[in-house]
Amino acid sequence: AQSVAQPEDQVNVAEGNPLTVKCTYSVSGNPYLFWYVQYPNRGLQFLLKYITGDNLVKGSYGFEAEFNKSQTSFHLKKPSALVSDSALYFCAVTSGGGADGLTFGKGTHLIIQP
Amino acid sequence: DTGVSQDPRHKITKRGQNVTFRCDPISEHNRLYWYRQTLGQGPEFLTYFQNEAQLEKSRLLSDRFSAERPKGSFSTLEIQRTEQGDSAMYLCASSVYMGTGPTEAFFGQGTRLTVV
């Protein structure tokens, strides 16, 4: 069975400061990791993914994430937060072993304060 | 807009009634997924199709749930004899599978089901 933990229900960051949204995972086999963002009344939007290769992956809107195999983590980061980054962020994992059904975390509310 | 579209956006039904939702994926996408999301939780995987073949079903998908993708294009999700516990947002997503590992899925805005 695979699982994702997002230990923080909410993260508060001042505009212009760096932000980190934490994610740890558990999966049998090689992990394929994703971050999605959900704005109110809008569908989930893909931000970035780790499949293989460089541990630091870059995605949309200036976000990046670092894959750490030893710590089974895939934290989302951004060097300078914008108020418009305020949203609900989901980390997801699959092992890809025949099925690509994603297992999502509970989500983290990111609030950027002006 | 040529994204994933779902219909209806909202559905209120009485307990015991049957409901059917439709999903139209992005046209060139060969994989289609159904998820369910309840308040305060992340989406939970229900089932997925590759073209018209249903390849996996979650244990969450009870016998009252059935999904089809008859021509490998749109899909329907039917819930029979709805229960209050079925109240949730039902999300559809699609992706391109090229045999080299998972690719990102694109999600629709969902159908919000309320069972009263």
Image (tube, helix red, strand yellow):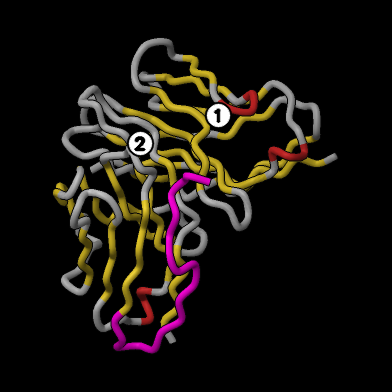
Question: Disc 2 designates what residue?
Answer: A93
Q: Amino acid at mark 2?
A: Val
Question: Can I make out residue B89 in this image?
Answer: no
Q: Where is the C terminus of chain A found, in terms of image quarters?
A: top right
Question: Can I make out residue A56 in this image?
Answer: yes
User: Residue at left 18%, top 33%?
Assistant: A97
Q: Position of residue B82 (x, y in %)?
A: 31, 81
Q: Position of residue A61 (x, y in %)?
A: 64, 28
Task: Pick the residue in front: A17 or A57.
Answer: A57
Give the farthest residue toward the top: A54
Work out whether disc 1 and disc 2 sit on a shared chain.
yes
User: Residue at left 80%, top 35%?
Assistant: A14
Q: Chain of mark 2?
A: A
User: Residue at left 17%, top 49%?
Assistant: B52
Asked if residue A9 lies left or right of residue B62, the reply is right
- Counting other residues with Cα less than 10 Å from the Cα at mark 1, is it few (<14), some (14-19), or many (20 or more)? many
Q: Quadrant of residue A83?
A: top right
Q: Where is the N terminus of chain A found, in terms of image quarters?
A: top left
Q: Is residue B3 magenta?
A: yes
Q: Position of residue A90 (x, y in %)?
A: 50, 43
Task: Pick the residue in front: B72 or A66.
Answer: B72
- Counting other residues with Cα less than 10 Å from the Cα at mark 2, is it few (<14), some (14-19), or many (20 or more)? many
C-alpha distance separating marks 1 and 2: 14 Å
- Number of callouts: 2
Q: Chain of mark 1?
A: A
Q: Position of residue A31 (x, y in %)?
A: 30, 27
Res. A76 mark: 1
The dominant secondary structure in magenta is loop
Asked if B50 appears above or below A42 in the picture, the reply is above
The magenta region covers B1-18
First-in-chain label (1 vs 2): 1
